[in-house]
Each structure stands twice: as structure tokens, then as C-alpha cells.
Amino acid sequence: MDNSRRLERRQQLLDRIATATAVIILLVVWEAWVRLSHVPTSMFSSPTQIVQATIDAWPTLWPATQVTIIEGFVGFAFAVLCGVLIGIAFYCFRTLNAALYPLLYAAQTMPLITIAPLFLIWFGFEISGKIVITAFWGLFPIAVQTIRGLKAVPQFYSDVALTCGATPVWTLWHVKLRVAARQIFGGVRISAAYIFATATTAEYLGARKGLGIWLQAAYNSFRTPLIFSATIVIVLLTVLLMSIVNVCERVLLGPPENDENPDE
């Protein structure tokens, strides 16, 4: 057991070193190509130019980032709550599932640009509207994975719980949801992967402030390094949110290998 864990940790360390090395090589090649090719800054920017532009624009970039952080995190929280509850409702009520499940799938195919104008009419240009849009688009994968996860729970889990005197409601909340939790977290991770991109796009289509408006101003003024700056901020926020999701999963459910080897 100790040897296998030691080998696994060593492999994880090697994987991280390989990732860091690839990133460093990419940045060096990127910097060298821009400098040696004399590419205009308005067309493409080197990593050093992006860093310098980010530092110079930080007094305006950070306030815009704070707005998007609020929209992303609050919208994501609502997406998780509503997505799980909708998934449970669809699982428990067969008629509801038969009537609305195809619509739930179809709703995922709607482009944001086609429905965002309606949210602007309903909620205006305030932060609350962007939170609603973010939550609305983020709940679909969570709801679908909750339904699929609950349906995939083997029947014997329920049989054992009911035989021991548990009620169907208790069995749902304490047995089925626990068994389906890994798959539900898969949907949560999918939602987290594009939650800030959704918030930024919603701002870009219509808002008073936020990264989307900041990005639009950079585009209109052909300040290409700032476009990269906004992109990097969105990526970092997404990585932060996904890291939080992974930590929550590990704290609530334990390491994934424990599910595969429950007797160890």
C-alpha cells in the first residue's frame, strides 16, 4: 500500500513537472516568435507585453474583475442549488421528467446571444441580470448529471436501506444522493468550466461594468495586450473555481480511489 501510494505521488510530481515545462517552453517560443518576427502589437502580443499591459491597466482591470467575480460565484451557487433540486424533482416525478426532460436538453443548445436580449429587457444592465443569466446557463449540466447519477444508482442500495427501516425520502437524501454524488460533481465541474466565460459574454452583450465591458473597450481601441489580459483573468478565475469544486468534492466525499476500493 505504501509503495503504491509513493509511486502514485511520484507520478503526480512528474506530471506537474511535465506540465510546468511545457508551459515554460510555450511562453519562451511565443516570446521569441513575436520579437523575432516583429509582429505589430495591435495584431499579436508577447507574454512580456501582456504582463506589462496588465500591470499598467490594473487600476481599471481589478474593479471590472470584482464585478465579474460576484456575478460568477453568486450565479454558480444558484446554478448548483437549482440544478440539483431540478434533477431530484425530475428523478422523483416521472411525469415531470417525461414532459420536461427533452426541453431541458434542448435548452442547452440555445446560444447565449439569442436569449441574452430578453434578459436585458427583463433585468436591465445591472449585476442581478448577469447573475440570473449565469445561473440559468450553469444549471443545465448539473441538472442532467443529477438525473443520470440518481438513475444509475444500483437498486440494492435502496433495498438495503428500506429493509433496515429507512423511509424513501431518507433513502433518497442519505443513500442515493451519496452514491450519485461523484456524477453530480462531474456536472458541477462542467458548469464551473464555463461559468465566468458566460458571465463575461453576458456583460459584453450589455452591462454597465465588468470584464465584458472592459474587454469591449480594449477591443474598440485595438489594445490587443489588454484583450489577452482579460482572457488570462477569466482563465485564472475558472481555475480557481474548479479548484474550489475539487476541494469540496474531496472534503465531502473523500479521495476517488476510496470509492473504487471501499474495503481498503
Image (spheres, helix red, strand yellow):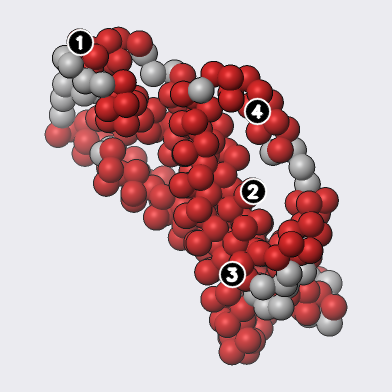
Label 1: which residue?
163
Q: Is residue 26 above or below residue 34?
A: above
For discs 4 and 3, the disc positioned in front in the rendered view:
4
Label 3 packing within 10 angstroms: few (<14), some (14-19), many (20+): many
Asked whether, in this view, residue 158 is left or right of residue 233, the answer is: left
Label 1 sits on what residue type?
A: Thr
Residue 126, how many percent across, how many down? 67, 73
Q: Give the SS element for disc 1.
A: helix
Label 2 sits on what residue type?
A: Trp
Q: Is residue 199 above or below residue 40?
A: above
Is residue 32 visible in the rendered structure shown here?
no
Label 3: which residue?
68
Q: Give the SS element for disc 4.
A: helix
Q: Give the SS element for disc 3.
A: helix
Residue at 66 percent across and 56 percent down: it is: 133
- C-alpha gap between disc 3 and disc 1: 49 Å
Label 2: which residue?
137
Label 4: which residue?
100
Label 3 sits on what residue type?
A: Thr
For discs 3 and 1, the disc positioned in front in the rendered view:
1
Label 4 sits on what residue type?
A: Leu
- C-alpha gap between disc 2 and disc 4: 17 Å
